[in-house]
Image: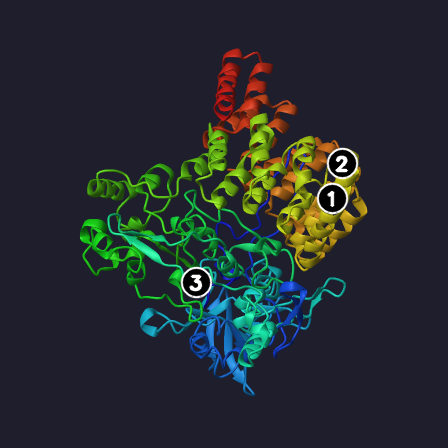
Amino acid sequence: MAQGKSPGSVSNSAKRRMVAWGGVVVAMIAVAVAVVWFHDRANSGVESRQKSGPGGTTAKYIGSDACLSCHTVEATEWRQSQHHAAMAEASEQTVLGNFNDAKFTYAGITSKFFKRDGKFYARTDGPDGKLADYQIKYTYGVYPLQQYLVEFPDGRLQPLSIAWDARARKDRGQRWFHLYPKERITHDDELHWTRAAQNWNFTCADCHSTELRKNYDPAANRFQTHWSEINVGCEACHGPGSRHLAWAEAKKAGKSAAADDTMGLSARLDERRDVTWALNTATGNPARSRPRAAEREIEVCAQCHSRRSQIADGYEAGKPFLDYYRPALLTSPLYHVDGQQRDEVYNWGSFLQSKMFASGVTCSDCHNPHSGKLRAEGSAICASCHLPVKYDTAQHHHHKPGSAGAACTACHMPTTTYMVVDPRHDHSMRVPRLDLSVKLGAPNACNGCHANRDARWAATQVNTWYGHDPQGYQRFASAFAAANADAPGAQAQLRAIAGDSTQPPIVRATAFAEINAPTSRTAIEALAQGLHDSNALVRLGALQSLANAPLDARASLAVPLLSDPVRAVRIEVASVLAAVPATQLSADARAAFDHAAGEYIESQRYNADRAEARVNLGTFYANRGDAAKAEAEIKAAIGLEPLYIPAYVNLADVYRASGRDADGERILREGLKVAPKSAILHYALGLALVRMKHTDAALGEFERATMLEPGNARLAYIYAVALHSTGKPDTAIAKLEKVLVAHPYDRNILEALLSFHAERGERAAAQKYAVRLQALSDRDN
């Protein structure tokens, strides 16, 4: 299976909905999913749709068959590629799985795979948990696994979570397996194959088919998704081909159109044309003959090989990536603190932090874009640029020549296995940092093979070999680890990374996004620099932090970006400024905001099939003071996906702002009926009950929340405050001191302990916490 978006890829630690806490009063903001797991339904057959082309002309999608007569070599390679097999109608030629009455049992359900009247079926548990027969409409992927898509009457395509292992039998393949083997996913779980989290139309289609149009109708709650080609065809990467075909025909006829420098293409992927790499024999490394001046090719690949959310329809080669997608940054739990892949992130974010990217390497330097294969096998692909007599030696890799440990990728591109059977190389192409494994717990390539030894052993070996701890290109792990722990000095370290122009832009963007904007004037000043950066990804990261700043800071800093040339930045600004009163903006700024707000609303409407998008829009309306629209949108989110917990919390907060806490209590209790073990729902209900002066009941909800998430510092803090306010200071202090062990830098807990001890006249104890708070402030300013 090609690297696509699949629900089976979500890690156990990150697969459940994650919630961001606001202040003491919950002001939940459901963030748009930066993931695209499954793909949309589409019509078979080729459709020709008009597209804007260079010079204001139009181009149409004409299908890959129109390319084959001139590009025979590329066509032959493409037909053997996983792009060609990314999706297909189910047939004897395309279905790899065993449908000869094969059975597979999972979570107490025995599913059966069979054929009837020449068609393929699965008898398995449906949305109600009952067994039913489902026809397999399409295949999805090909190796090392293949999934199968079922079409529902409302236009949804849903992939079965039972997949076929397409590997050879000698490699433990040729079997059915479940994508969540260590869990028990039943029909009432949000990850069941019939639910929204596994919907192909939203999460997969944009990458597995060409010219995909989702076409979701929110009024009817149905899809009419279309494509021009069912798989990843020529035009998925080169753009609509009609103008190129006209150019080629004109060239054959000797007409003037042949002089067109664009060749009629929406984007010429020519960053490598006439480029050479000169090898420095002293260092063993090459240098590009001229700097890479564009990222067109990389952005074309990023459309599918990145962790991102889609914000608009209609991307094609040559258009700005950030006009159509909002990529994820190097944040936890997607990445480890040193930037290594953790969850399924699809290469782009890893590659952008690499020295290869900084040196001008493009995807096709290593990969044949038509076959999808490496341009050379094994370490030979690395040796095409890096001098083998320097690197392919025992003195360098300290392994037996020709062994698995001697392979370049074994150390510099270790794999992580996703979807049970699919190992993928980390494209950050890093020097192994054993010292970071010892200090920060980051994984390393050495212990990936030597699993029976610990990181200290590996670090000692490497230090002995080279006489020092290797440093490598990525130099941000300590700052990101400190930020994750909210450790002293973390904010200062983040500001240093964010302001370091030698750091990769995606690293700087992540550092800006992690800065805690309300902490100090220094933080605001740092963000101001990021908002004026020439790199759009850096501006986007700075805006994500600015969203937590005071309203006056948002208004003064974000307004100029309302007219940013990049759509992802403009809609982020609209969200950041949503709560800023119009009276604080000039007439010109209000007009610019209205335009950006329209784009923001349009982006959420595009994803109106998702509960999180409806909650985003509801929160936006709430911030604009339109409670009626906010209520309608968030109710629609609950209707779409009753298990989406943030919807209940956000709706309760809308009711709170309108003085309707009784309605807030009601909606939170409705949420608890579907998710009785949700700590955030118990917490939010406790807050509502406090406002309604039902103190004892509130205390019970806070206690329940902390029992469900005993390691959550925010819950422990609120529960302790409630205990203290109801005359139980000893219990409150004891609980805070216990949780402080795991969260030694939590300012809320330290401030509460300072206050509680001071109120009791315990000056020494209070002073102890005052000193710790001051130390935190000193190191971050």
Instruction: Note whether 343 is above or below 774 in the view shown.
Output: below
> For the residue labelled by badge 2, is the local secondary structure a helix, a strand or a loop?
loop
Q: Which mark is residue 65?
A: none
Instruction: Note whether 773 is above or below 536 in the view shown.
Output: above
In 3D space, how far apart are the residues under numbered discs 3 and 1 (Cα atoms)?
42 Å
Q: Amino acid at mark 2?
A: Leu
Whichever of labels 2 and 1 marks the residue nearer the N terminus, that label is: 2
> For the residue labelled by badge 3, is the local secondary structure a helix, a strand or a loop?
loop
Q: Which mark is residue 273?
A: 3
For the point 62% across and 24% down, the residue is 724
Q: Amino acid at mark 1?
A: Phe
Side of 441 where 112 appears, left or right: right
For the point 32% across and 66% down, the residue is 376
Q: Which residue carries the number 2 mark?
A: 585
Is the Cβ of the residue at disc 2 closer than 8 Å to that at disc 1? yes
Q: Nearer the viewer, residue 614 or 318?
A: 318
Q: Which residue carries the number 1 mark?
A: 593
The furthest residue to the bottom: 117
Whichever of labels 3 and 1 marks the residue nearer the N terminus, that label is: 3
The image position of residue 438, as x and y in percent, is: 32, 39
Q: For mark 3, does the 10 Å Cα neighbourhood hold few (<14), some (14 to 19), or many (20 or more) residues? A: few
Quadrant of the rendered image containing residue 705: top right
Q: Amino acid at mark 3?
A: Arg
Residue 122 seen from this side? no
Residue 455 seen from this side? yes
The image position of residue 24, as x and y in percent, is: 65, 32
In this rendering, which labeled residue sits more in front, label 3 or label 1?
A: 3
> For the residue labelled by badge 1, is the local secondary structure a helix, a strand or a loop?
helix
The image position of residue 7, as x and y in percent, is: 53, 60
